[in-house]
Amino acid sequence: MKKKILKLQEEFNHRIAEIKDNEKLEKLKNEYIGRKGYITQMLKEIVTVPKEDRPEVGQLLNKVKKNIQQIIFEKEKSLAEHQEESKKIFDITIPGKNFKIGNIHPIDLILKQTQEIFLGMGFRFVDGPEIELDYYNFEGLNISKDHPARDDQDSFYITPDVLLRTQTSPMQVRTMEKQPPPVRIISTGKCYRRDSIDSTHAPMFHQIEGLAVDKDITFSDLKGVITEFCQQVFGKDRKVRFRPGYFPFVEPGAEVDVSCGLCKGKGCRSCGYTGWLEIMGAGMVHPNVLEMAGYDSEKLTGFAFGMGVERIAMLKYGINDIRLFFENDLRFLSQFK
Ligand code: 2NL
């Protein structure tokens, strides 16, 4: 009997080593430790063992039973783990992880596009401080302390002489002071004004300004550059017109309109039934501005223009409220790709 028990254990050890799935393991479990299994069978057979040997044989049988139970338990665990593991490696039906990639802010999109267009026409890009001296923001641009134009460009003052720039022109003045002509620059960035917030005004906004100074620069050059820019941003089919307009730093000055894209210039609600949309101010640089920067206004002429980036973006994308740009609502911002 003892031999038979040990043989049973040995046989079990061989058989379990071969097993690779739950179904076969379950069968083997029944075969050995089930209700009609070998072990139960042998427990019944114990009566055939001589009385004095029974305790020893019984103990051995119990030991083998426990042993087999333990081995089966371990095998069940390892099969389950293996299954988990192979799921991880092989289940190609699990959906991939969706990486969220951000997109460029619509204002930056217009800024980048604009820079590309003007770089293509030979302009250089300059960058400068948002905290400026009164001199560069106003005085050097022909806006003296008592000039009424200051009313439209009320600023945030840090001291009476230091303020948040109300336009990007200060960098143009700084550039002229620093370098001899010819000058062909684009200045872009944030500007600040003490405006009440509404659908077309924000206390912080972005501007794009251009300046070209050289011998023999004419209003025709300005018209050519601006028309090219408008057609690249809004489309080849757009027309551009120049109306007289006043800015203290230019003479003559002009307001620039682009033909309405919705009605093709016929007049509709979106263009106020005029067929035109105002997009920027421009003009020939005022002789006073050239002189203050140290340029000879008898020998040199120049043109300049300035536009609000938010306004360009609103016209291009059909947006009706400037506040959308600054509220950081991803449902809005993620539409510009
Ligand atoms: C507007 C009008 C304009 C300029 C900006 C400029 C700069 C220098 C000299 C002369 Cl250094 N002019 N810039 C000229 C005309 C118009 O901007 O309404 N911008 C949003």
Image (cartoon, grey):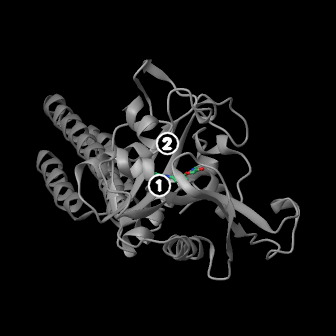
What's the residue at 58%, 46% (across, down)?
A: 330
Q: Is residue 216 left or right of residue 286?
A: left
Q: Is residue 82 left or right of residue 104?
A: left
Q: Is residue 161 left or right of residue 202?
A: left
Q: Position of residue 91 (x, y in %)?
A: 41, 65
In the displayed structure, would residue 234 be above or below residue 47?
below
Instruction: Give me the C-alpha separation between circle 2 and circle 1.
Output: 9 Å
Q: First in sequence: mark 2 or mark 1?
A: 2
Of all residues shown, which one is farthest toward the front? 298
In the displayed structure, would residue 214 be above or below residue 168?
below
Q: Can you identify the residue that label 2 sits on?
A: 167
Could you say which quadrant of the image residue 238 lies in? bottom right
What's the residue at 21%, 33% (across, down)?
A: 58
Q: Position of residue 112 (x, y in %)?
A: 43, 61
Asked whether the beta carbons under mark 2 and mark 1 sit within 8 Å of each other, the answer is: yes
What's the residue at 37%, 61% (across, down)?
A: 298
Res 200 seen here: yes
**Badge number at residue 209:** 1
Q: Is residue 182 left or right of residue 221?
A: left
> For numbered disc 1, what is the local secondary structure?
strand
Total numbered labels placed on residues in the image: 2
Q: Position of residue 180 (x, y in %)?
A: 24, 58
Question: CB of residue at label 2: within 8 Å of ligand 1?
Answer: yes
Q: Residues within 10 Å of mark 1 (few under 14, many from 20)?
A: many
In the displayed structure, would residue 265 be above or below residue 153?
below
